[in-house]
Image (spheres, helix red, strand yellow):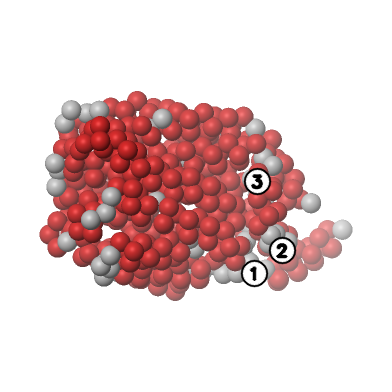
């Protein structure tokens, strides 16, 4: 029996060569993928610091700006993520990530050459199409390089790309637009993504599926259809709550990060460069600390009880709510920046733990699609409706509040923070059982 088992193991090893990654390579690969996500967020969020000069130059309304930064981008970004993720569960993920980064970086450069609102909308659609292929394959690669007990931290480090990207986008975008105009800002931030795409293509390896879980791609079987992935996820009460909680958190986060530069310009007469510096420092460093610290805490306490992955996030969301109210009711810019520290800390804190749990709720060949399904829900509701809702409410409030309509529009949507906390807490209640059900599903 032992000899036969050894022969089987030997055959499996011959069929799937060992891919023992050194800690140094794993960390390098995670860093490079995080750089790709940074480029993703620089190109996505650069628009926020440029909304006010674009409004003045192209003569558009807040509703149109909300459409440009929300629905226009989100529909293509979210919906195309699913078929691209299906491809990633079947083919080389590294190549998909590299091609996606090259596409959205090129389209960001094109934004600098537009002369009308329609042209800018089309260019942003191109950015959304490119960014759709970046994250889910990266999540799948990270899950195959890092074991379950380190996965939330790895996802948290990857998610630092959000904060670093916003830091670069606000800092570079703010000063470049002030000195050289908003078109130049698109050119400056778009070009480096091409170099990152080349680094990913020529320095990273495609990891063996299941490597970090002690199994193989052969054991995982063929990649299932998206309907099967969605049915497995949606059959689990924890995922239904986690996905809706992420959507609500993203609604508040995207609404805030998209419109806060315009709010600071209108309510406190701050310059683009000054706003870019403040927001870059707060979102980049404080927000980055929140993204990593929440993922680290989820990993640490999750070893005792896996439900802590969601409990930690729920606590962060609840603390964020009253400080958000203080931000938008502040009498001057310095108090506004002080109150913004906690919302910035919480802005992307939910992503690492939520991604880690979603990856655990499916089998190996479902991971890229599982991330895409989570991002589909998160981005259609959060990215698509958050900025759009603020723009609509601001235009509705304008007859009553004039220049301050944006302040009260932002204040109105902050109710989503405690609502998100409730669903993260409810998602934790069945997480243990759902993770075990997913494990048994993979053994069938």
For residue 238, side relative to residue 129 (left or right): right
**Number of the front mark, 2 or 1:** 2
Q: Where is 362 relative to 404, above or below?
A: below
Residue 249, quarter of picture: top left
Give me the disc on residue 144: none
Residues at circles 2 and 1 in contact by the CB criterion of under 8 Å: no
Question: What is the C-alpha distance between the residues marked 2 and 3?
Answer: 18 Å
Which image quarter holds the N terminus?
bottom right
Residue designated by label 3: 233
Q: Where is 63 relative to 420, above or below?
A: below
SS state under label 2: loop
Residue designated by label 2: 222
**Residue 300, visible in the rendered structure:** no
Task: Specify few, some or many for label 3: CA neighbours under 10 Å numbering under 14, 14-19, or 20 or more.
Answer: many
Residue found 84% across the figure and 63% down from its top: 4
Residue 143 image point, x, y percent: 56, 54
Sequence order check: which comes first, mark 2 or mark 3?
2
Residue designated by label 1: 17
């Amino acid at each position: 029996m032992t000899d036969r088992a050894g022969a089987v193991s030997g055959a499996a090893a011959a069929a799937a060569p060992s891919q023992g990654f050194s800690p140094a390579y794993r960390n390098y690969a995670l860093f490079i993928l995080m750089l790709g996500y940074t480029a993703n967020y620089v190109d996505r969020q650069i628009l926020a610091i440029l909304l006010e000069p674009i409004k003045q130059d192209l003569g558009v309304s807040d509703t149109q700006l909300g459409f440009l930064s929300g629905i226009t981008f989100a529909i293509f970004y979210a919906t195309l993520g699913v078929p691209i993720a299906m491809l990633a569960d079947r083919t080389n993920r590294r190549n998909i990530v590299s091609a996606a980064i090259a596409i959205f970086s090129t389209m960001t450069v094109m934004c600098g050459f537009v002369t009308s609102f329609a042209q800018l909308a089309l260019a942003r659609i191109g950015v959304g199409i490119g960014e759709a292929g970046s994250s889910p394959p990266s999540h799948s690669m990270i899950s195959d390089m890092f074991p379950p007990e380190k996965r939330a931290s790895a996802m948290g480090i990857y998610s630092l790309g959000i904060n670093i990207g916003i830091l670069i986008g606000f800092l570079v975008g703010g000063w470049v637009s002030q000195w050289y105009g908003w078109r130049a800002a698109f050119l400056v931030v778009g070009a480096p993504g091409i170099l990152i795409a080349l680094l990913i293509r020529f320095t990273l390896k495609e990891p063996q599926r299941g490597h970090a879980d002690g199994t193989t791609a052969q054991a995982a079987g063929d990649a299932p259809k998206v309907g099967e992935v969605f049915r497995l996820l949606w059959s689990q009460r924890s995922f239904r709550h986690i996905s809706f909680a992420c959507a609500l958190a993203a609604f508040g986060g995207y609404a805030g990060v998209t419109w806060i530069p315009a709010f600071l310009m209108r309510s406190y007469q701050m310059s683009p460069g000054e706003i870019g510096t403040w927001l870059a420092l707060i979102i980049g460093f404080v927000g980055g600390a929140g993204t990593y610290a929440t993922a680290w805490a989820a990993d640490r306490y999750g070893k005792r009880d896996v439900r802590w992955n969601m409990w930690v996030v729920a606590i962060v969301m609840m603390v964020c709510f009253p400080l958000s109210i203080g931000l938008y009711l502040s009498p001057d810019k310095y108090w506004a920046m002080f109150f913004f520290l906690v919302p910035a800390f919480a802005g992307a804190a939910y992503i690492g733990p939520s991604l880690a749990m979603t990856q655990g709720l499916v089998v190996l060949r479902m991971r890229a699609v599982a991330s895409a399904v989570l991002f589909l829900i998160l981005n259609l509701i959060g990215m698509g409706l958050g900025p759009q809702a603020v723009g609509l409410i601001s235009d509705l409030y304008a007859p009553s509040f004039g220049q301050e309509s944006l302040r009260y529009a932002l204040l109105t949507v902050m109710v989503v923070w405690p609502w998100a906390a409730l669903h993260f807490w409810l998602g934790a209640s069945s997480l243990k059982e759902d993770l075990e059900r997913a494990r048994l599903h993979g053994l069938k």
